[in-house]
Amino acid sequence: MNGAQALLKTLADAGIEVCFTNPGTSEMHFVAALDGEPRMRAVLALFEGVATGAADGYARMADKPAATLLHLGCGLGNGLANLHNARKGKVPVVNIVGDHASYHVKYDAQLQSDIETVARNVSPGFVRTPRSTAELARDAAEAVKAARTLPGQVATLILPADVSWGDGGVPSPPLAIPQALPASDETISAIAALIRSGRPLAMLLGGRALREPGLRAAARIAASHGVRLLAEVFPTRMQRGTGLPPVERMAYMAELASVQLHGIEHLVLVDAKSPVSFVAYPGKKSDLVPEGCQAHVLATPAQDAVASLERLASCLAADQLPTIQQAQRPAAPRGRLSAAKVCKAIGHYLPDNAILIDEGITSTLMLGAMTAGAPRHDLITLTGGAIGQGLPNAVGAAIACPDRPVIALIGDGTAMYTIQALWTMAREGLDVTAIIFNNASYSVLNVELERVGASEGGGKARAQLDLGHPQLNFARLAQGMGVHAVRTNSSAEFNKALEYALEQPGPHLIEACVPESLNRSKRRILPWMLKALPSLPQGLARAIKRKIAP
């Protein structure tokens, strides 16, 4: 075998079944070797950010990594944003980056760059450059092990061309994955004592704690001891809907998140990070844990969060039946189309066992409330905040779960970052329905312009946040890449398009032409947020208004 052939066999033996590729000259021996490994599916992307985002979406739903194939440092740079999202979501990815032949590096050719330095931004725990064909397969097996070991990470293997084409490749057997341990007896006892004290306490759930077993264990504790349950603002993957315990997500806006935590004296973190503001704001706190509230860790991301919750529930004798979400769908929307009505239609038509990908930014503020009582589904969100994740995630999720419908809700601004994902959906015949909110604006940035204290921005400043000149037509863009697409301006048109898309094999794109989701005045945000966070006591409206108002 040459190195590339040994590498592919090593990956396949370790359970890697899909490679999302955007290859160049240095990766040609890897490309040629794909024909000799029938267990490896190769999926071409027209942009590296699609390949990396698809690998992210695949791993979130398959619970194991896919591989990427990127071309040199420039290709890695193009894919970096979605690798950042994967890193923040603790998603396992085996990231393979081709490099020049080792003897060619000294010539500083046009594409030469320091790939290791670039890679460490998204792979701080594992970056490896094998120096010989004999080392390659062993390094690949270690990359898979690193990616799959909790908490999960992006493991980057840099593949010099001569190492790839060199003879003497020997496949390496899979390495054992260390088993994650639950919280210690001392930690369980300490958290149980806090809960028994009766002081106001909330549990912030993230990671695997937001899957059904973790949700049910946490909900038993909440029902038996009056604990409040919250979910991270941007969960990697959250199971929700009819028959599951409902959990309210933390608000994106720091002002609202601090209100959600108002009065809490103890915050218990379960595979979750202590909440902080998304970005810094002049004169406002970055740490969202309220004064007088202590944060405690039940389970770190490297521990078994579900087993920790189950042990805590057993310690507390938490056997009271938890609150379960009842089936409840909103009526189909009517009249003029709006972002809220699109969310309402999703709640009305959402099929059973769907995968819902939310990158609608401001347009999907009502999505949680409208889909709470819909059939059970998985929710994927923008973990790292780098936009352009949603469409590629849909590609990966659809390949991981070909028997499940995938619905991706995407803002118009974010769609343009990775619009090439539509071509891959068409090429692979994926059952994806992409819904693009076309409000001709970076709406969230119009809000942020005021929140950071720059509200005096004039015409030139506002023009940087406007997408209406020229107007984007996503239906035509999609059709040009082979995806069935329609443009909708009314609720009736949107309902008809969504029904058709869910009944017919995909992919489909529905362009929802909606007015700007949020008015530039922060006071107009208040009623949206109160509806999106239904568990907040209405008496807190004045406090919220004081925090948000200019």
Image (cartoon, helix red, strand yellow):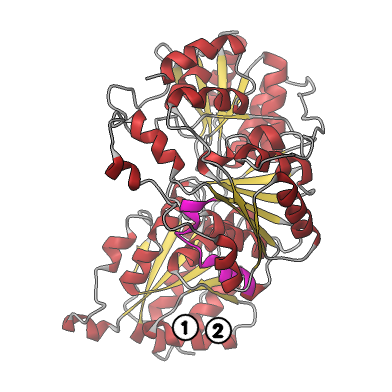
Pick whichever, 512 or 145, lies toward us: 512
| 242 inside magenta stretch | no
Name the mark on residue 34: 2
Q: Quadrant of the C terminus?
A: top left
In the rendered image, residue 498, in percent from the top left (x then y), is placed at: 74, 53
- Label 2 sits on a secondary structure element that is helix
Disc 2 residue type (three-letter)? Leu
Segment tinted magenta in the rendering: 411-426
535 is higher (above) or lower (below) than 32: above
Q: How many marks?
A: 2
| 414 inside magenta stretch | yes
| Within-10-Å neighbours for mark 1: few <14, some 14–19, many 20+ | many
Tag 1 residue: 30
Disc 1 residue type (three-letter)? Phe
Residue at (60%, 8%) from the top-left corner? 198
54 is higher (above) or lower (below) than 368: below
Real-space Cα separation, disc 2 to disc 1, in angstroms: 7 Å
On the question of residue 263 being in view, the answer is: no
149 is higher (above) or lower (below) than 47: above
Name the mark on residue 123: none
Does residue 266 appear left or right of residue 345 in this picture? left
- Label 1 sits on a secondary structure element that is helix
On the question of residue 325 being in view, the answer is: yes
Residue at (52%, 87%) from the top-left corner? 33
Query: CB of mark 2 within 8 Å of CB of mark 1?
Result: yes
Does residue 425 appear left or right of residue 261 in this picture? right
Main secondary structure along the magenta-highlighted residues: helix
